[in-house]
């Protein structure tokens, strides 16, 4: 039985593409670097930024940390609100919570920003806990965030279902022996969910709700 449902944020509850890509472009501009097409930056949605700047743009760790600092200059005031909840997600969270499940946010976005986003879009009321990455990057990977969420909720891993839109969510959950669900309305693909071992793969919000309520 899944007593607790851990939700990813970006690409699962909200579409953050505009804010994230605008802030990456701002950071690159400030660093005097070439700005790639916006579409090529969508892969930044999901993984920790420190890893993404190095893997996708070939930065050194030092450059990546400076890029993150600049990214957050814009994100903390403007970028976090360039974001839109997926249609029907608030109703879905209400239905899942009303069924008796306990909801916890588990995101690689810094917790401070994640809480502000939930509050801004009136989604915070559905969550028992909101857990995110630390600003110093010491807790940034999805498995580290999930470990933190388990500690904060006091739950057992066998009582949790993780829901997210990228393979990082599936792999991070597996580290702790947690079943995971991949959602296809975000930025992941069926192929990456199958390869990473997702127990469930859903293409619609109503399908997600029905499966979660049945567990």
Image (cartoon, helix red, strand yellow):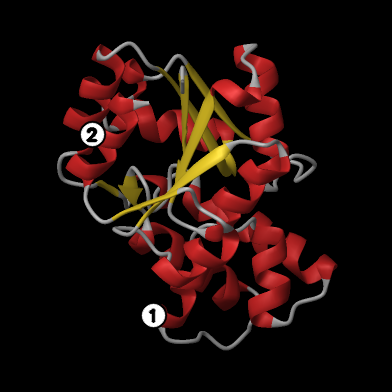
How would you rate the neighbour count of disc 2 (Cα within 10 Å): few for under 14, some for 14-19, many for 20 or more? few
> In this orientation, which residue lies closer to the viewer: 5 or 62?
5
Please state the horizontal and vertical placement of residue 33, each as a whole percent of the image: 62, 84
Please state the horizontal and vertical placement of residue 205, each as a whole percent of the image: 22, 44
Label 1: which residue? 39
> Measured along the vertical axis of the image, is residue 30 above or below residue 133?
below
Q: Is residue 197 visible?
A: yes
Label 2: which residue? 210
Secondary structure beneath label 2? helix
Separation (CA) of disc 2 from disc 1: 33 Å
Secondary structure beneath label 1? helix
Please state the horizontal and vertical placement of residue 147, each as a whole percent of the image: 71, 30
Please state the horizontal and vertical placement of residue 212, each as a whole percent of the image: 33, 31
Q: Residue at x 24, y 13 (%)?
A: 98
Q: Quadrant of the C terminus?
A: top left
Q: Is residue 134 visible?
A: no
Which of pointers 2 and 1 lies earlier in the amino acid sequence? 1
> Measured along the vertical axis of the image, is residue 45 above or below residue 81?
below
The answer to whether residue 177 is left or right of residue 197 is right
């Amino acid at each position: 039985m899944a007593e607790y449902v851990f939700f990813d944020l970006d690409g699962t509850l909200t579409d953050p593409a505009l804010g994230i890509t605008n802030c990456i472009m701002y950071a690159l501009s400030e660093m005097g670097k070439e700005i790639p097409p916006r579409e090529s930056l969508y892969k930044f949605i999901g993984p920790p930024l420190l890893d993404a700047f190095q893997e996708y743009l070939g930065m050194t760790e030092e450059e990546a940390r400076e890029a993150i600092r600049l990214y957050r200059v814009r994100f903390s005031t403007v970028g976090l609100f360039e974001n839109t909840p997926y249609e029907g997600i608030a109703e879905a969270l209400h239905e899942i919570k009303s069924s008796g499940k306990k909801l916890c946010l588990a995101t690689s976005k810094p917790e401070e920003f994640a809480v502000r986003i939930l509050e801004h879009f009136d989604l915070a009321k559905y969550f028992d806990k909101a857990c995110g990455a630390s600003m110093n990057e010491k807790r940034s990977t999805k498995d580290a965030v999930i470990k933190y969420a388990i500690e904060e909720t006091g739950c057992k891993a066998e009582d949790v279902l993780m829901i997210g839109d990228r393979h990082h969510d599936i792999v991070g959950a597996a580290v702790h022996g947690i079943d995971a669900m991949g959602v296809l309305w975000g930025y992941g693909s069926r192929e990456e969910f199958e390869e990473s071992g997702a127990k469930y793969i859903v293409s619609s919000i109503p399908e997600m709700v029905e499966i979660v309520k049945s567990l």
